[in-house]
Image: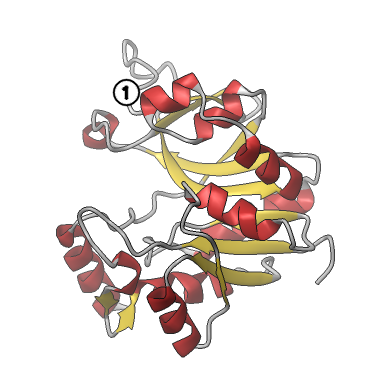
Amino acid sequence: MTTEAILGAIPARYASVRLPGKPLRQLAGRPMIEHVYRRCLQAPSLSRVVVLTDDERIAEVVAGFGGDCEMTPAECASGTDRIAYAARHWDAAAVVNIQGDEPLIDPAVVEKLAQHLKQHPKESMVTLASAIDDQDFNDPNVVKVVRDRRGYALYFSRAPIPHPRRQDAAKRLQHIGIYGYRKDTLLELARLEPSPLETSESLEQLRALENGIAIRVLEVARSEPGIDTPEDLARAEALLNRI
């Protein structure tokens, strides 16, 4: 591996309020984390895909399907902290943070982000967004983002932004929770204290904006959401069984 490498990191923890053991929940005969891992392997710009966990049960399952896994401390407060802890010893240019609860993630979406990092080495951080419908626009569980004219994030919010006084005035976008970082940017973020807007909205990416780190937002087609509830699990199972 060289310093130009781009790694795909999948933080995974066992604890979950609504779905305990979520990464190991079975979907179409395989644990959820395996679906995510195998889809990320299909992104050719990633030099390596690795699961990061503090739980031996997850590590054992990943090893069982032939995946790459590293153990990280239980004290890591977030997925970003978990990746930053491991990335300190990685010889890599950038890291893509893929959520471990998205078994239907499109490999082309992961590749788009990794390719952007490869082609734009001066950009510190990049994420994705897609068009949003009226129902999701008013749902506080769905994060919205507004961009400037160059495609950089102005703000992320659970509120419906921009305010729809004129429907044709600005494009409405839903944030997709996958991130790419330069390694030094990732380590810097992990060192920073939680910021006021981050705490208010409970959105970690606002820490970057509040500290002057620009986030490029690329637009992609609407994607399947992650798994948070038993209903989400059943829906994903049905979709995977059709593939």
Query: Please, is residue 25 above or below residue 3 in the view?
Result: below
**Looking at the picture, how far across and down is residue 102, in whole percent?**
38, 61
Taking the image as shown, residue 71 lies to the left or right of residue 91, namely left
Q: What residue is pinned by disc 1?
A: 160
Q: Is residue 2 above or below residue 128?
A: below
Q: Residue 72: give x, y in percent of width and height.
A: 55, 63
Residue at the top extreme of this rendering: 165
Q: How many marks?
A: 1
Amino acid type, residue under disc 1 in the picture: Pro
Mark 1 closeness class: few <14, some 14–19, many ≥20 residues within 10 Å: many
**Measured along the vertical axis of the image, is residue 189 above or below residue 102?**
above
Q: Residue at x 46, y 58 (%)?
A: 74
Q: How is the image coloured?
A: secondary structure
Q: Position of residue 129 (x, y in %)?
A: 47, 41
Residue 156, quarter of the rendered image: top left
Quadrant containing the C terminus in the rendered view: bottom left
**Is disc 1 placed on a helix, strand or loop?**
loop
Residue 52 percent across, percent down from the top left: 53, 65
Left or right, residue 228 beside residue 211: left
Q: Residue at left 69%, top 66%?
A: 45
In the picture, the quarter occupied by the N terminus is: bottom right
The residue located at (71%, 70%) in the rendering is 47
Foreground of the two, 63 or 114? 63
Residue 227 falls left or right of residue 37: left
Residue visible at 28% across and 67% down in the picture: 21
Residue 65, can we see it?
Answer: no
Report whether residue 166 is seen. Answer: yes
